[in-house]
Image: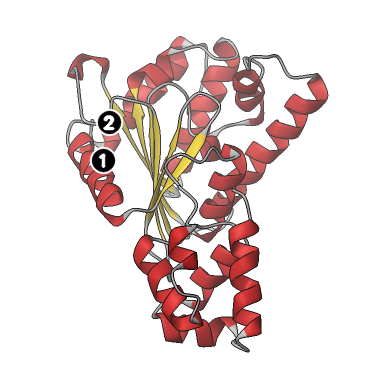
Amino acid sequence: MGNTYGEWLRQQRELAGLTQQQLADDAIMTRSHIAHIEAGRRVPSKEDARRLDNALNTGNVLSSFLPQGDTEVVDYFEAARQLERQATVIREYALSHVPGILQTGRYARAVLGAAYPRWSDEERDKHVVTRLDRAKVLADPVTPAVWALLDEAVLRRPIGGPTVMADQIMHIVSLAEAERVRVHVLPLGRGAYPLLQGMLSLMWFEDQPPVAYSEGQSVGKVHDSPALVERLQGAYALTMGEALPMGESLALMRATAKEYGHHD
């Protein structure tokens, strides 16, 4: 996400002699939200930008030059990582492969090894480290609260081969048994459902509005339009209603790992 906008906001705030907290109070926002905008991690909504313009007497500059979140291509690893670190609740949906924060090292290496154009071993290793760094959000025993909604296809596609898949599936089972994550599987027999399109993360925060994050071919997109985020939250809730209960989901995952050759 380009940071020219955030730097300009910081300059205008400093010229006005305001701290981040004072600007937040004047614009009816939180200090951390201002900090994220200035650091280039977030793009304000149109309403936020209008209030910032009013608070800083900048006419409609911040509103007019608002980065277009829906057309901006971002470094999807970095966007997800920054948001995940701040989230108190994360709800993941995956259609084709295991979500980044739940991946094992060997599984991540196999996923990233399929990139086109092909990365050098050094580039791939760097991305594997970044992806495993994302998994550190699970090191805290409580926060964030994580739910994972997995299409059964995620379990059936043998990424990295049988041993890697067995270990990957049991890694998620272990996290669920430790009550660190909740996992639900959507059986292949369910047919169509509202989220049948790709990867989606929904995130909630202590002091800023919720966001949705979607991944496509080599790009990631952060959505913070309240109407769109609410629509995606609704689609997630409807899809969850099509999934197996957690106990049945874990039983299916254990059985699948056993088919891949895992032995208790």
On the rendered structure, is 241 left or right of 263?
left
In this rendered view, identify the residue nearer to me: 242 or 205.
205
Q: Residue at 42% of width from left, 19% of height from top?
A: 155
In this rendered view, identify the residue nearer to me: 81 or 136.
81
Q: Residue at 74% of width from left, 19% of height from top?
A: 119
> What's under tag 2, amino acid-wise?
Leu
Q: Is residue 99 above or below residue 230?
A: above
In this rendered view, identify the residue nearer to me: 217 or 163.
217
> What's under tag 1, amino acid-wise?
Tyr
Q: Position of residue 124 (x, y in %)?
A: 73, 25
Q: Is residue 242 above or below residue 39?
A: above
Quadrant of the rendered image containing residue 60: bottom left
Q: Position of residue 32 (x, y in %)?
A: 53, 72
Q: Position of residue 118 (x, y in %)?
A: 70, 14
Tag 2 near tag 1, CB within 8 Å: yes
Which residue carries the number 1 mark? Answer: 236
Give the crowd class for mark 2: few <14, some 14-19, many >=20 residues within 10 Å: many
On the rendered structure, is 164 left or right of 232?
right
Farthest residue to the front: give it.
59
Give the crowd class for mark 1: few <14, some 14-19, many >=20 residues within 10 Å: many
Quadrant of the rendered image containing residue 48: bottom left
Q: Please tell me whether mark 1 sits on a helix, a strand or a loop.
A: helix
Which residue carries the number 2 mark? Answer: 195
Say the numbered circle drawn on residue 13. Answer: none
Q: Please tell me whether mark 2 sits on a helix, a strand or a loop.
A: loop
